Image (cartoon, rainbow, N blue to C red):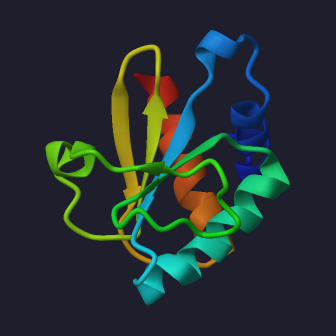
Amino acid sequence: MYPISLMLCLLAVPAQASEQVGLIFVYRSDCAASRAFSTSLKAVTDHYRLAVLPVTLDDRRFAEWPGTVRDHGQAQTLGIERVPFLALFDPTTGALAPITSRYLPPAHLERRIAAAIEASHEQ
């Protein structure tokens, strides 16, 4: 198994743009767990320069995620029942690998993301 920092760097700087995987972060602005998780996620993704697609369920954006998109039923289609929700997404295959649906501090979040990356490369 690769060190977490190496795996996160591999995700942040893919060999080819088409090979890049990213993270999908689904949240509600009125959810305290989503707010706390957002801060944790932002710290990790900024440090490793990871791509994130933030999706709001209530059409209100967190300031740290200016590129947030509004949910148009995708969360229900994907079976997302709790927020915050984070998943690894591979745009070339459409594969979605859930990482967590609860708050995690940055160190735990790094480990979960690294494990999801490793699992995606094993398939």
Quadrant containing the C terminus in the rendered view = top left
Residue 25 position, x and y percent, is: 48, 55
Residue at 54%, 65% in the rendered image: 61
- In x, y percent, where is residue 98? 35, 50
Identified at 23% across, 57% down, the residue is: 80
Q: Quadrant of the N terminus?
A: top right
Query: Residue 115 in the image: x percent, y percent?
Result: 52, 48
Count the marks.
0
Residue name at image x 65 percent, y 59 percent: 65
The image quarter containing residue 110 is bottom right
Whether 32 is drawn above or below 107: the answer is: below
Farthest bottom residue in view:
32
Asked if 31 appears above or below 43 in the picture, the reply is below
The one nearer the camera, 85 or 28, is 28
- The reply, left or right, for residue 6 in relation to residue 32 is right
Near-viewer residue (95 or 118): 95
Q: Position of residue 7 (x, y in %)?
A: 70, 40
**Left or right: where does residue 91 sit relative to residue 79?**
right
Q: Residue at x 80, y 55 (%)?
A: 46
Above/below status of 98 relative to 33: above
Identity of the residue furthest to the right in this view: 47
